């Protein structure tokens, strides 16, 4: 089961809406969205729709990090569909988390998750953590899933030795990311190489890295796969049939990256839990 529930203004009246399929324009107009995955995983997502536009003019605006995107919904639905015992106590990192849906879904399944993004997104991420019961002042409950927020901006000076190293040192079992690669005004994908380097730096020999993205431009897909094949021995696409309907979207891919090349593991202090 999949459902999105939120309030929306229609003809000057505030109405309750429930959707059983993604609807980007409806979702992006809402201040809060209740997401149900697999029938029993329920996540409360706070958004800032007024921050979606204008980030290119005003760098303080959140831009795409201000709301839910289909790539995150698809990846979260895929994870919820897998055997849930696998997630109990699993150590996970979400990159470019935005509102944090994928990481919050993993925490709801029993994982210990660090959701990361650039500094200006941290306040919204922390609001979403608190909205879902993850209070940093109280700390994790014994035997329960947990989520925390941390700043990580790949491509900045020293980022592999700074923010990545402590996370990798914890022994990461799963790295997840949704819609983290993009095309700039010159038709290039400028952050993809550093993004893939970050994925590889977090991964040990048995770590899984799952990356979803919308097929907005063929250059994004080509660049991601080129960089991934430089840094991982195994690069394979997750079959669309593995995603539950109605989130089996033809325009969203999930790629699995495993077994980083030895030179990419410089940030890892110890292997992940098996």
Image (tube, rainbow, N blue to C red):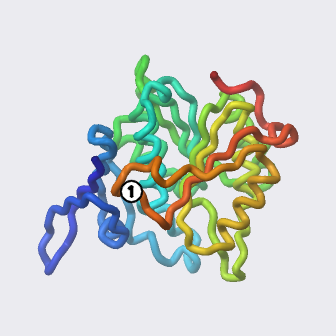
Residue 58 visible in the current orientation: yes
Q: Nearer the viewer, residue 78 or 96?
A: 78
Label 1 belongs to which residue? 247
> At 61% across and 74% down in the image, what residue appears?
217
The picture places residue 97, in percent across and down from the top left corner, at 53, 52
Question: In the image, is residue 159 above or below residue 51?
Answer: above
Q: Secondary structure at mark 1?
A: loop
Q: Nearer the viewer, residue 240 or 20?
A: 240
Query: Please, which residue is most extreme toward the top here?
Result: 142
How packed is label 1: few (under 14 Cα within 10 Å), some, or many (20 or more)? many
The picture places residue 262, in percent across and down from the top left corner, at 85, 37
Question: In the image, is residue 130 above or below residue 216?
Answer: above
> At 37% across and 68% down in the image, what residue appears?
24
Relative horizontal placement of residue 267, taking residue 129 as reference (left or right) = right
The picture places residue 12, in percent across and down from the top left corner, at 14, 78
- The quarter holding residue 4 reads bottom left
Question: In the image, is residue 139 above or below residue 32?
Answer: above
> At 53% across and 65% down in the image, what residue appears?
214
The picture places residue 133, in percent across and down from the top left corner, at 35, 35
Q: Quadrant of the C terminus?
A: top right
């Amino acid at each position: 089961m999949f459902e999105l529930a939120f309030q929306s203004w229609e003809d000057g009246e505030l109405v309750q809406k429930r959707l059983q399929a993604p609807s980007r324009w409806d979702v992006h107009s809402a201040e809060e969205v209740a997401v149900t995955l697999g029938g029993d995983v329920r996540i409360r997502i706070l958004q800032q729709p007024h921050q979606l536009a204008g980030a290119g003019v005003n760098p303080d605006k959140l831009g795409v990090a201000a709301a839910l995107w289909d790539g995150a919904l698809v990846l979260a639905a895929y994870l919820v569909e897998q055997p849930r015992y696998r997630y109990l106590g699993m150590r996970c990192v979400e990159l470019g988390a935005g509102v944090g849906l994928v990481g919050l879904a993993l925490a709801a399944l029993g994982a210990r998750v660090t959701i990361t993004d650039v500094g200006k997104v941290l306040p919204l991420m922390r609001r979403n953590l608190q909205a879902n019961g993850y209070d940093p002042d109280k700390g994790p409950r014994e035997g329960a899933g947990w989520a925390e927020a941390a700043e990580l901006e790949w491509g900045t000076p020293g980022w592999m030795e700074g923010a990545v190293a402590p996370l990798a040192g914890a022994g990461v079992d799963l790295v997840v990311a949704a819609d983290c690669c993009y095309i700039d005004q010159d038709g290039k994908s400028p952050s993809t190489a550093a993004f893939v380097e970050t994925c590889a730096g977090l991964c040990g020999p048995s770590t899984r890295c799952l990356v979803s993205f919308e097929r907005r431009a063929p250059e994004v897909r080509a660049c991601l796969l080129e960089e991934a094949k430089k840094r991982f021995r195994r690069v394979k696409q997750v079959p669309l049939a593995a995603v539950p309907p109605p989130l089996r979207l033809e325009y969203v891919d999930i790629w699995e990256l495993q077994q980083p090349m030895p030179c990419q593991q410089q940030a890892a202090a110890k292997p992940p839990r098996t």
